[in-house]
Structure formats: structure tokens, C-alpha cells
Amino acid sequence: MIDNVSENKAKFSYFLALEKLFSEIQERPSGIMKERYGIKNEKPKTLEEIGKEYKITRERVRQIIRETFKKLKKKKNDILNEVLDKIVLAIKEKNGIIKEEKLLSGSLETKERGSLKFFLDFFDEIEYRETSGELESSWTINDFSLTEWKMAKNKVKEILEKSQKTLIESEILNEIEKSGKINITQKKLLDYLNVSGEIKKGNFKKWGLKIWDEISPKGTREKIYLVLKETEKPLHFKEIACLIDKYKLNKKKKAHPQTVHNELIRDERFILVGRGTYALSEWGYKKGTVKQVIGDILKKNAEPMEREHIMNEILNLRKVKKSTILINLNNFFQKVGKNSYSIRK
């Protein structure tokens, strides 16, 4: 693959291959091509920037680039064949389609990345593909079936919209197999999904629609919700802040525990179940003090309830000590018999 080749520059270098190719053309067109593809500098230059440097118009720059490509395409040599073979192999290993970012990720040096970008544009045997919002910037081999890719992508989108939850690869594949409409391997499915602009893999290794908060959480509240939902247990606000950082939900800055705590307090989805510990209301937890929760439980029962039964109910709703429950029972409720309690009349 390209990644392996670029790591071992002693074996192959796109820059050296390009230098050899450019040695057969004049200095000015060679320099213009290097400027355009960012081989000399940290980033490619615009047609206007190149024109100002060479004191020619943008259209003349465009014409020189076009003529240089045409001239170089007539050349046939072993170096070009080797470059083409490596690029095609890398794309084929991804089932015929690969995200441009991934294709370039193995070439860390500016001149290597720029040279590879040149070769991507140079060869007619590969094709650039992009559809706004649907397909990210990608490269394919010429006989790649975009229709097949769309069919697979749309099927996964349909599965996700129906489930309304994020899914792991095996779950998606199982649903596809159940439908009987598409025959696809897990490797091919992942390669297809990796270039999708609509379907993304979240930080918890599950797939979902890009617009979902579980995949692209924007605010602190959405990130808190995602952490609690994925861990499936009540957490202290400091633990939540640590997990936001661990799963890289904040791209640039660290999560501040106090900010997390403030958002937990303000959102009805989060319930305080212990000292600094919060759970999701959708899990059945309810707001209120231990006294209020005991009162709600006793009101639902016509008869007095045994102490152990009350404790079990409370411990399912709150992360508190048994002694705290006993204090509230004895101070605010009517003791009936030896071990039972009811609402105080």
C-alpha cells in the first residue's frame, strides 16, 4: 500500500519519481507545476499567486499546466508504471474507492504529498469522485461501480433511520443479510462507509448518521449525554469530564469538570442520584430528595411497605447510603409494626 511505501523512502519516493519525470521538461513549466501542487512550499499556490510570481496571467498559468500534462502523458517509462501500480493497488485494497485524505496520510513530507497529488491528477486510469454531502473527496479505479456503492450506502442509511440508534459493524451486516437484497463482505462494507459523507463512525466505535448527536455531538450537554448513554451507568461529574477527554469528544480543549457540572444541573435529561453523581432520566431515575422519592413510592402502595422493599426501590433510583434512607424513613414517615412504613397522617 501507499502507506507502507511512503514510510520506506529508501525503497520508493514519489518526489524522486516526479523529479525524474520533470527533468525532461523545461525549468519554468516544472517550477509552475511544483508551485501548483505544493511541492516547494507547505501548501499549493493559486493560479493568481503563480501568475504574479512569473508575471503572467492566470489563464496563461492554466494553459502551461494543461500543456505540461499533455506533454508528460506521452511519455512511457518504468517509473510511471511503478507509480501507477502502487496507487491502483492502494485503491483496490480498499475495494476500489478510498478517501483522498487516507490516500495521502502515509506521505508526511510536503514534497511527497505534493508529488502524490500530482500523480493522482496525472493518470487517466484513476478518477476523482465527490458528491456534496453524500460522498467525500475520494479516488476510484475507472471501473468502480458508483451505483453499487450508492445502493450499499443507502441500505445502511435506511437501517440506521429505522433503528434510530448507533450500531456496530456486525449489527449493520446482520440487517443487510436479513434483507437479502445486497451481498457484501464486512471489509467491503467498511471501505464503502469510510467514504460516505452521510454515515460516520463515532468515538465509541459505532456507526450512525453524521447529523446525529451521538456521532457529531456539538455542545457539552450532547457530549455528557453520549458518555452516560454509552457507559450505561451513573457517573460522577468529574468522571464524565475525564471520559469526554478520553474519547476525544472535545477536539481541541479539555473538558472542565465545573462546566460539565453546570450543564448537568441545567438539563432535565440528567438526574442527580448521589453526591455529584448523575444518571439519565430515561433510565427511570426521578428528580427529588430521598424524602420525596420515598414519599412517591409509598403513595403508589395502598398498604404499608417493608423497610427492605423500600430500600431496594430507593437504591434502584439513587446512589445513596442505606443509613441515609433509614434516617429519612424514621424522621418523616410513619412506622407500622416492626419493619414497615407508610405515609405519616
Image (cartoon, rainbow, N blue to C red):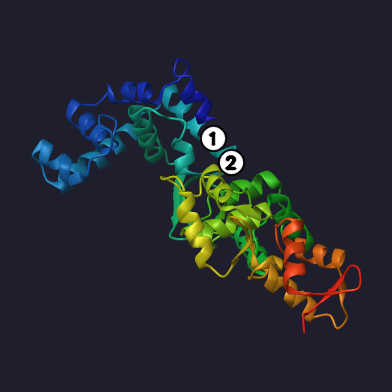
Q: Is residue 50 visible?
A: yes
Circle number at residue 26: none
Q: Residue 238 versus residue 243: which sits nearer the camera?
A: 238
Residues at badges 1 and 2 in contact (C-beta under 8 Å)? yes
Q: Is residue 310 left or right of residue 160?
A: right
Q: Residues within 10 Å of mark 1 (few under 14, many from 20)?
A: some
Q: Residue at x 45, y 43 (%)?
A: 100
Mark 2 element type: loop
The three-letter code of the residue at mark 1 reads: Ala
Q: Using the numbered discs, state the Cα–Cα distance from disc 1 to disc 2 in whole angstroms.
A: 7 Å
For the question of whether residue 207 can be seen, the reply is no
| Residue 115 drawn at (x, y percent) | 35, 31
Say if 25 sits above or below 247 in the image: above
Residue occupied by mark 1: 90
**Where's residue 11, x and y in %?**
48, 16
What amino acid is at disc 2? Lys
- Which residue of the protein is positioned furthest toward the top in this rendering? 10
Local packing at callout 2 (Cα closer than 10 Å; few below 14, some 14-19, many 20+) is some
Residue positioned 76% across, 61% down in the render: 315
Q: How many marks?
A: 2
Q: Horizontally, is 305 left or right of 50 in the view?
A: right
Residue, x 37% and y 37% (percent of image)? Answer: 117
**Disc 2 marks which residue?**
94
Residue 282's image quarter?
A: bottom right
Q: Residue at x 42, y 23 (%)?
A: 79
Q: Does residue 284 lie above or below 53 as drawn?
A: below
Image quadrant containing the N terminus = top right
Please give left or right for residue 254 compared with residue 322 in the image.
Answer: left
SS of the residue at dot 1? Answer: helix
